[in-house]
Image: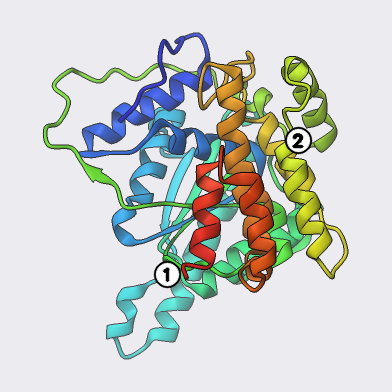
Amino acid sequence: MKIIDNAKNSDVELAIINDTLAQIALSGISITSIWVANFLVALKSKPLILLTGPTESAKETLVNCFSNILTMGNFYQYQTMMGHPWWASHTSDVVTYTRTQSRFNTLKLESIIEEASLPQNRGRYFIAELIKISPGELEEYFSETAFQLQHKELMRLPTSHFSEPIPFPPNLSIVGTIDTINFNRLDRDLLSQATILDCYPVKPISGLPSENFSPNTFNEKSLLHSSIRDPQQAFWKLSKILVRFSSGLLPFLQVKQVLQEFRSVRSDNSIFEGIVYLANSWSYTGEGLFDRDSRINLQIALDLAISQSLLLPQSEKIAKSINLQKRLHKILDSEFPQASTYLNQLNPA
């Protein structure tokens, strides 16, 4: 476990990252600060998050520790739901139990949407988590919801249809976990509103921390003010941060250009989504969330933004073209380990 060096308690976002790492360590496992920061940046950037990976990647532990730190354990702000009743496969009426679970989850989602929308709660963060979802829940709760959220409102949820559109509160995130090492559901609607985070098997800690853990009390309004989802605001923030790095975005733009040359379909919004992610990689006070050194923070953020915003949506096309892979490796291999590893996974041979 690596704690961000010299984190200032006055910076809400850095304190959340460090307290989450400490809480995770108390559960007996260790992950890097980069992946906690990646979850935080994803939370700021889009309303939906999907964590994929094997069971032993402790996806639920990350979400649980992070959410409890952020909400200070407030039950009304952090709700967990069993995404799919896997146990029902051993019963004689799988369909009934699945529908019942879906209805229960929808009722809880409707409740947390209503709670987050109350005027007195607009300065508080709410998280709804669906654990171990199946392809069915992925389609209903994420793909269909993402399609609607392009207009920032909902007309329906699984088992429920509203008489008029309901605004989706900006202080609510819906998080899902999927036990898979080969996530290939990459429809454009889903990717427009959801960040896909690959999680890896975690390392157990031989001895639990002996020191007492005392979480900070956070001002959730600071995190909400820090969240940017509008590309124009993101460009404005980045222009101030990167004034000392005139060619800071060049690798991101080079990868986008190479992908565009090989694409046979119309241009998409991946560049704007990447810029939003990069802008959210600095806190409201201007501190790097991956590293206190702005140059290193930019390097790590670019690596993740390229992987998640540019490479992942085009993974099928990249996997089919050796020439495309070679051109991408030429840009990425020397300085972007995460993106390079992702490319290698697309074509292990």
Q: Residue furthest bottom?
A: 92
Question: As shown in the figure, which amino acid type bears the numbered disc 1?
Answer: His
In this rendering, would 311 be left or right of 135? Answer: right
How packed mark 1 is, by other alpha carbons closer than 10 Å (few <14, some 14-19, many 20 or more), is many
Q: Quadrant of residue 191?
A: bottom right
Q: Looking at the figure, which quarter contains the N terminus? A: top left
Mark 1 highlights which residue? Answer: 84
Nearer to me, 20 or 279: 279
Q: Residue furthest right?
A: 266
Residue plotted at (64% across, 18% down)? 284
Question: As shown in the figure, which amino acid type bears the numbered disc 2?
Answer: Leu
Mark 2 highlights which residue? Answer: 250
Residue plotted at (43% across, 83% down)? 96
Measured as percent of width and height from the top left, residue 103 is found at 51, 68
How packed mark 2 is, by other alpha carbons closer than 10 Å (few <14, some 14-19, many 20 or more), is few
Measured as percent of width and height from the top left, residue 186 is found at 64, 66
The secondary element bearing badge 1 is classed as loop
**Of discs 2 and 1, which sits in the foreground?**
2
Query: Can the viewer see residue 114?
Result: no
Query: Can the viewer see residue 98?
Result: yes
Nearer to me, 338 or 24: 338
